[in-house]
Image (cartoon, rainbow, N blue to C red):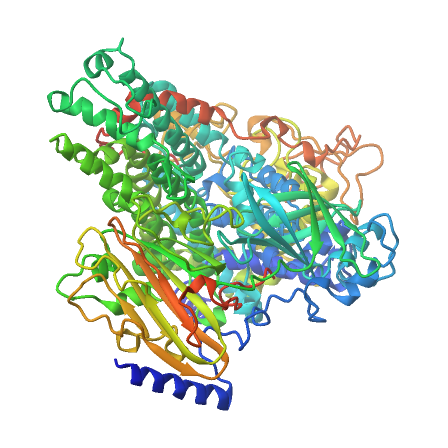
Amino acid sequence: MTRAAKVLAVLAWVAIAGGCDDSPAPASSAGGGASSSGRDDDDDDDDGGEGGAGVGSSTSTGDVVGTTTTTTSTSAVGSTGTGTDASAALYAALDDTVWSAIVEIEGRTRALELWFDADGRRWSAVRNPFGPSRADVAGEFQIEPDGRTVLAVDDASGEVHTWDLDVIGGSGGTPRTLRRATDDGVDDFTEGLWPEPVGGLTAELRVFSSSGPVADAYCKAGGCGIDYATLFGFARGLDVGDDMGSDLVAGARLHQWYNVDNFAVTDVDGFDPGTLGGTELSDQFNFVVRYTGWVEHPGGLLSMRELDDDVGELNATDYGGVWAFIAGDVGVGGFADLFLGVNAFGFCDDGSDDEPLAEGDPQSVPIEIILIRCNTDGPQVDVQMSLAEGDWLYVGDQPTTPDTSVTLFPGGL
Amino acid sequence: MRRAALLLPVALATLVPSEASAYTTRVHIMMANRVRDALAVDGATVPLWQGEYAVALAPDDARAILNEPLAFRAGAVGPDNMILPGLTDPSHAVLQRPFEQCQRLYEAAVLDKERAYALGCFLHGATDTVAHHYVNYMTGETFTLNPITAGRQQGYANVVRHIIAEDMLQDAAYAGDPAGFTGERMSHEIPQGFVLRTYFDLDSPVYGLMASRAIDEYNQTIDENPGASLPEVIVALDAAPADHLVLLPVYVAEIQRTRGVVRDWLESELAAMQDWDTAEGAELLVWPGDDGTYGTKDDETDCSATCANLFAKYFVIAGLLEPRFDASGNELPPAWDKVSGKFGADLDRLLPSLVQVTANVSTRLNTGLDQGGGGIGELTPAAVEAAFDPLTSWGDEITTIDTQAIASAVSPDWLLDMDVFFQSFGIQVDVTAWIEAILEPVLAPIRDGIRAYAIEPAKRFVDGLSSDYRALRQSTLDEYAGRLLAAAAPELNGATSLSDFYRMGLYGHSYNISAAALGNREAVLPGAGAPADHGAASFDGSHTAPWMEVGACPHLRELIYPLGADAKGSLGLLRDGVITASTLGDDSPLECHGGSLSAFSVEPNATTCTMTSLDQLVASPYGSISRAYPPETVGQVVECRGIAIPGLPGPPEGGAGGSGGASADDEGDDDDDDGDGDGDGRDGASAGDEESSCDCRAAAGGDASSGGLGVVLGAAALIAARSRRRRR
């Protein structure tokens, strides 16, 4: 594809986007995905971490719930005919709330959200809400007559978690604190959602079998027989039959993938142990990472490149690959739609210029970048971008917004 | 009369809206709905059937039943789902203490839906004790896979006859109230987490009760086969599919433990090879390389190509246990831990998969009759295959491991490094073959044990049962219809009492005992003595009423069984206070063997009715394996404990009075009995507390089945399938 054609394609997209605001995936609106996640913790308002107004009023004294009489009605409790004043107060204090904290889980430092729906008697816990190693459990809970002991039952396993909960503070505009005591210790949760990452991109990592269709599609493809449909489909999670493990994180910075034998998933920014405990995967070869989100483009030219246009070219023990899509091709594009393509097979068409260009007005440009590490030593990969004819910087150093849509990061309840 | 007799089977067959038969679990759900509907009127009480009294429920229980109808219904069929249709001995059979299982469920309940499920379990059992007396009369024997008609060999005929007898009841119930069997009224939801936590957790008191017998046999098998691997124990156990399913938590725990044992073995082998005082160590003469650390690839050895096997063994094991590091210096788990950990996680999916299969089958068998719902006859091989998919998929995935794929996927650098490493010494080593050998003790119990002896037989059982059912259905229906006509009161003018199902004693008594059990679970729970001496020994047996408080106490018996607790009473009708009695002259058999395996004794007594096991019975054909006889048959007196059921009148002043063993005809005869009347109903929470957890010797017994090199080498032994008599 020629440079001119790419420019036209982007201009066409700009015109469409401006006309009907029908942005393709990722789903977040221009300027960032912060409001798109659907992770509101409250049906009544959208005040994010401050929680529902009704709930706040129930503990306006700032005292510990359970030792304070509240006048807030508790329809759930009343409807079932149970509940002491103490338990009713805690039900009311927890209703439609979300709390977040940093906690130790199995020896790793993680973020944790606790969600409560007192009417439905539902609870959930979301570990690392924006990854890595995101995991959630949910179930039903009930508060014992002491108004403090909570029995939270896991739907899937039936496991019964016993917590002592106290709701503290909440006056003077400061968020309330949920103190949870368990046999493992005491954690203080602040009312509100765990904050969304504000920069970087969203990275989806998938490990594939060394002897499966994905490896055959690229790593073992010979004679330019690259099967892009299989490769991209796997990276996009459309066909994960070959999936040997996966993880997801928002806010990952795409910097250099460097050429050392023991490069592992934990070396990929966002999945490293320093990011909320990191991934639980430890694979070192045969994985793809798909980055998605928006480039906050100041307007003018947008260009990308792999620094030396070499991802192991003609080196059978050094295979990598980079493929990028922008605008309407994000999530759906194939080889013919590549904005940037760099493969390791020197004589095979990359699918793009070495430094393709697009041009458009200031806007959030949807972007998708797929990187692969085969069962080889792995090359050095430097994916860079230039905005408005500025310096070439790693994508991770450019202004970007990760995709935090509810599809990828649903709420707890 | 003659014309009606000819028409009746046809009429019955057309009552259900599909050609396939229906299954009895729907009747349990219908009963649960009716009890709940009655409770909903005032939110607190359940009036007795055509009676003047109403049983008052504890507020928490009433709330749970009212708020959680789906779970209450699921509990009402819960024992029939445990573990699979037809494989219900663990939750029903004699000496399994089924009502105490319900009680432990109740005690384990945290949420309302869990409480509702547990209360449903009581309703199921209570209903069964009434229905099975009648059904056993029709079929000739208590539910068993080793019936007398097969000389106590295995056969489905008895089970099929049970199902068909219960089908007839459902047909009659449906005819009387089609709206009671719609999809909406049949829908239910098993709280799967609760089932996992109670029925399939080694630490659960419910599991401890349900599995105690199977675990005893498992441990005994280990004792009889010292040093046997788990697959060998599973084969030697020679248990029925249901028992293997019950033992799955034990097998899973043992396999998980074996993962640790294998790792310990790897470490010990490595240490031995590094010890110059051992034979292998003296040959290899290992010393650390430049890094000064043993167990890394730069270790030096005195030989390589000249001791290729030993050299390969050392570096494969060292490589498996050596910590890995990423490019940033973060430590990654050793290759063995990565492979083993993935396998362990996969293994943990087994029990949830089993519960999902249970849910699938239950949904299939309880489709609304307005939605084309059929019965077990509808379980075609394809339907069985679909229902079992979670289990078969699990088994396929976990046992068809591509070691190369796993090793290279979870730790490909290690595999590559090992290949390159050995090649540098001119040695060709199939590293993946080594991994397979090391994994074998973990894989073999699944491939040769769980899949071969639990999953596949269970699937074949359901399949075979369905097939036999289809073959025997019509002829059995004809037989039953004829017998029911013969037992019908003349004033029914050629109809049977099934034509007015909801006024049958069978229905009314089932309803009443359900209400009583929900009002006070002591009504059906045994006392503190041995379970065979007091209480319902099983949900399956006949003649259970006089063993229970509701039957042993005259003041309760009159209210709960107004037409009598025998088969005749079940077939009688009560219409506006008027009884239309059945003409039935006989009753369910007294199931005691007096020398024959193919017939019951004509002289049941304390000798011929001595409780025994199937194996012992086959060895010496005397005794009973069902306790399907009333207490007086063996000269036993079941004293009325005088419990109070809220809403019902208490025992007469001066003592509880009475004892078990009375039939409808002699109700009241025992009113003057000198029961102690002290109302010493025990606290339900204490039921069976001596077995508050599983017999952990199952795990301890596993020590004999694994350990050290024997685990690795012994597990490769082929398992020869044997065909022997199966326990019921």
Residue beneath the point at 12% across and 24% down? B305
Return the x and y of residue A259 as percentages of the image width and height: 30, 50
Picture quarter containing residue B425? top left
Side (left or right) of A228 relative to B377: left
With respect to residue B597, does A169 lie above or below?
Answer: below
Quadrant in the picture for the C terminus of chain A: bottom right
Return the x and y of residue A147 as percentages of the image width and height: 79, 48
Residue beneath the point at 40% across and 87% down? A11
With respect to residue B425, does B483 lie above or below?
Answer: below
Return the x and y of residue A181 as percentages of the image width and height: 70, 41
Q: Residue furthest top?
A: B277
With respect to residue B462, does B300 lie above or below?
Answer: above
> Is residue B88 visible to the viewer in this orientation of the structure?
yes
Side (left or right) of A148 relative to A38: right
With respect to residue B133, does B434 lie above or below?
Answer: above
Picture quarter containing residue B304? top left
Return the x and y of residue B618 as percentages of the image width and height: 35, 28
Please state the total of marks drawn on the protein image.
0
Side (left or right) of B698 relative to A258: right
